Amino acid sequence: MKIADKLLNLVGVGRERGLPPPRLVAIADGLLVTERSAEAWFLISVANTDLATEAEQDAALDAAVSAAATILGDRLSHLKIVWGRSTGQDYIDSVAGHYRLGDHEAWAQTRADRIDEMRMPERYVALGVHLSDRDPRATAQVRGSISDALGTTSWRVSARELAHLDERVRKLGRQLGSTVWRAHTAPAEVISWLISREMHRGAVAAPRRGLITGASLARLTSGRVVPYTDHLRIYDSRGQIAAYTTVLAMTDFPEELETPGGGEWLRTLSEIKAIDDDGEEIDVTVEASVRFRVLTKKTARHLVDETRKSAKEQRRSAAKGTAEETADEIVETERVMREVKRDINRSGLTLVEDHPRLLVSADTREDLEAYVDAVIAHYADRGITVAAGADEQRDLWLESLPGDQLRVPDLGHVRESTAFFGSWFWGGASIGDATGPAIGYLTGSTPGLVRFDAAAGSALGDATTTLFLGRSGRGKTTAAMLGGLDSAFAGAWVPLLDLKGDAAGVSAVAAEYGVPTAVIEITAQFSGAADLLRVLPVDDALLQAPSQLMLLLPPHLRGAAEAPVVAATRAEIQSPDPSSWGVIQRLCASDSETTRTVGFALRDLVETGLGSVVAGPPSGLSSLTTNPGLWVVQMPGLTLPSPESAPESWSPIERVGMACLRGCLAWMVRTTGRREFRGRSKVVIVPEVHLLTKTPDGASFLDYIARVGRALGASLVLDTQDPASILKLPGLVEQITTLFAFSLRSREQVDSLLELLGRPQTPPYQTLVRGINTAANGKSIRHGHCIMRDRWDEVATVQIDIPSQRVAALLRT
């Protein structure tokens, strides 16, 4: 998408240079008051645009331009893009009350330690809007006690003025909140942080709690800033240099900008890299301050006319000179202004006057020079000229402070609104749940934590199925296990049906942190573990247990076996400790030869290792349980019949496999549906689910849990290498809320995955899927890197992150 950038460099030297810094009067939620003015401040939500289609970007950009013209027309506005840092303590505070089982404090601390280790930046996009000018003389006369209304000022603001400004902030907030920016009022402590961090460049984390007091207000701008020709030195309270900072001006843009690409000149801030002494790429932290004004049609026409008249006068003056030659630039300016005015009148073109500045900081002078060079080179590749404001550092820096004003008007531009908002200052990557456990981090243009709660769907009144898709060995099962662990720590009942037999590590992690857990193996050691008479309540067992036993029998015995098996089951249920093994013993002891034949056939089959799990003598070691915790049911080597084969043709080992599977699935279905467990969170995990979808029982089970999960408080977490088979289960597809996509190769599977992601089956997206797990060197696997689609259908790239080396070692499949 190309966006025109018909712009004019503003010229002239204003009287704003050299004005004293702003003097703070008061700060409240969404409001900043200085001696000279009052401003409303909002935080803009990050739009998820990194993997958006061109049509989606066009629609969002059109909506932004329209909203800006309607809401911000002729208002002096101030855009700031700054970086904080995610901290472990913030994470612990955010999950307080979420976990409740085992040593959940230690589990949360493990993730918090990892967050601190990563030192992950966190982007904030803040928008300030001028509300009114104030008379400094009026406030100068009311020095005195701290205002109880705000608790934030060493100067008094009248209650009447405060109420009036607050109402204006609220009204503007309602308007901006309904736009594509989803803006919300900036808390008072965040506004104070935006100011104080400019005086203390070492500050990294935005405040999360607490109010500003009068003393705090005075401290916001304490410190000392010494300007030099091409940089500033910022000193802390001890007189030590806290940071070296250079303010850069964006002085020249190409006539046309293209998005995706160079047109996104603010979104790409996080992509700037420098090279360290070892030749490795390092991130350069670049922040932006842009004072701008969206011009109304009247103002825009006036500006265009004045510019055209000025160019015309220059052309006439040049024509009268001795050379009698007209500068090409003057002629071009006249032509462009005529076109712009025509577009304003005919097509509703809107213009923006903007003054973009970039702020770069470093701990040393040498690093600062390297970072500034990297920023200049980054934008030069996009045809944009960036330069340090020589001898303008003081005014450019003050200009970036909230509460200040435009000081260097000649370093600005007038351009079409699409060219300004096409910078996508609110674009990037944003995905996942708003609260809950952190499962990894974003790898797009705006880094940040990714939160995912596998059990959240039911509480939100949403569907409850999560899907992990991709090739073997890319990290999908590990990611599913991490989600299951978080659910178990939160007090959920989490059964994991391990059809491959390689997921026992998740139980080891649970045990290390004190979560109730067990690994139930489908071997003779766990005889009777899948016995429905031992697992299900009496009423359900009376229906389910005979069916399970009948499945074990060869076809020629089933006709005569149904009545005796049901009768023996009814009798066994009356015993103190009923079991399917007891039913078989009753059959073998019957006076009827036919009944004894059925009993002997069952006994011979269940005395094998696999059959004993279904109906063998109870070993007492473990059985399937309904208690909160994490329970791994391992079925390695389970032989299941092919979907095409009729039950009559199943071999004995296939009949045992199906009986075993039916026992486990019946246990899961019954537990998720029990009335007394309706209020309990339940998360059923099935790795390698393509092994299950091949059977009627498996497909029916998945369809049932997916469809009724919301009502039952039950969630389904699946992983598979075969997205094409998932598409054949429309009932399941309709219930998928969250999807994690790892790499695939074949055209059919890649396109199936893209269909599930809601992305077009085009070469760029196909290439993305094939290479999502390929490291930058192209020769190694990037485990855990994937494409996520969340419950709101947002799509972005994320890295699943294991919280510690110890957990990684235990989870290894």
Image (cartoon, rainbow, N blue to C red):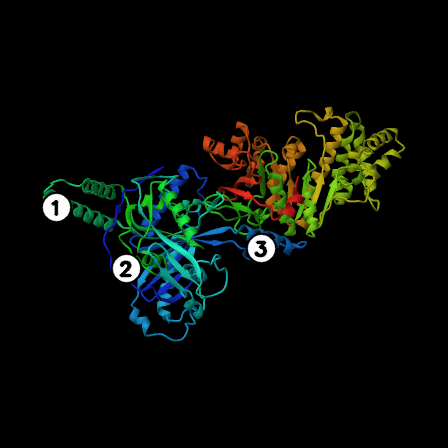
Kind of element beneath mark 2: loop
Q: Is residue 654 left or right of residue 744?
A: right
Badge 2 amino acid: Arg
Measure how far apart labels 2 and 1 are at the Cα level. Answer: 31 Å
The numbered disc on residue 425 is: none
Measure how far apart labels 1 and 3 are at the Cα level. Answer: 70 Å
The answer to which of 363 and 496 lies nearer the viewer is: 363
Please state the horizontal and vertical placement of residue 199, each as a whole percent of the image. 41, 61
Kind of element beneath mark 3: loop
**What residue is disc 3 on?**
95
Q: Is residue 686 left or right of residue 296?
A: right
**What residue is disc 1 on?**
317
Label 1 crowd bin: few (<14), some (14–19), many (20+), radius 10 Å: few
Residue 336 figure quarter: top left
Query: Considering only order in the chain, which callout, 1 or 2, is on the residue closer to the N terminus?
Result: 2
Q: Residue at x 64, y 34 (%)?
A: 699
**What residue is disc 2 on?**
17
Badge 3 amino acid: Val
Q: Is residue 404 left or right of residue 511?
A: left
The answer to which of 38 and 326 lies nearer the viewer is: 326
Label 3 crowd bin: few (<14), some (14–19), many (20+), radius 10 Å: some
Badge 1 amino acid: Ser
Please state the horizontal and vertical placement of residue 782, each as a whole percent of the image. 56, 38
Q: In which quadrant of the rendered image does the C terminus lie?
A: top right
Number of marks in the rendered image: 3
Identity of the residue furthest to the bottom in this view: 144
As displayed, is residue 596 above or below residue 210? Answer: above
